[in-house]
Image: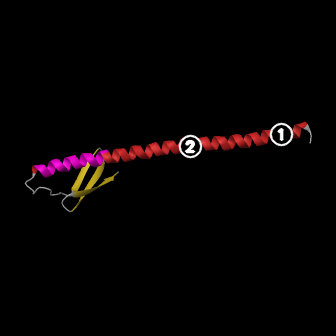
Amino acid sequence: MNQKGVALVQVLIMSVLLTILATGLLKMSFGTHMLVTKVRHTDVRKQLAEACMAFKTAQWASTSSPLGACASGTCLINGKTITVTCVGTTKANFVVLD
């Protein structure tokens, strides 16, 4: 094999290796970005649910209902609807809708 052929094979092998390396780095970078985005959205939803829970707790405290009573309903905070569903008298489920 002549020198030109060896050089071409070497360039081909190096370009394939660099492509594999670049693909791996991009996957790691975008994977981290997606994880941060998912965590941020989860945190925002948790804050909205806690704000609705605080509003509902204040609402429950201002009524003459028995201690531990739960009131189902919805809250509208920052354009998002949070639905409160009571489970018994001591637990409430919150669903955040966009």
Name the disc covering residue 8, or none.
1
Q: Quadrant of residue 12?
A: top right
Disc 2, SS? helix
Q: Residues within 10 Å of mark 1 (few under 14, many from 20)?
A: few
- From the viewer's perspective, is 43 left or right of 35? left
Q: Position of residue 69 (x, y in %)?
A: 15, 58
Q: Is residue 71 magenta?
A: no
Residues at marks 1 and 2 touching, judged by CB atoms closer than 8 Å: no
At label 1, which amino acid type do we have?
Leu
Name the disc covering residue 59, or none.
none
Q: Colour scheme used in the picture?
A: secondary structure
Q: Position of residue 38 (x, y in %)?
A: 43, 47
Disc 1, SS? helix
Where 86 falls versus 31 (above or below)?
below
Q: Is residue 49 magenta?
A: yes
| Quarter that holds the N terminus | top right
- From the viewer's perspective, is 1 left or right of 31? right
Real-space CA distance between mark 1 and mark 2, rounded to the nearest whole angstrom: 30 Å
Q: Main secondary structure of the magenta part?
A: helix
Q: Position of residue 93 (x, y in %)?
A: 27, 57
Residue corresponding to mark 2: 28
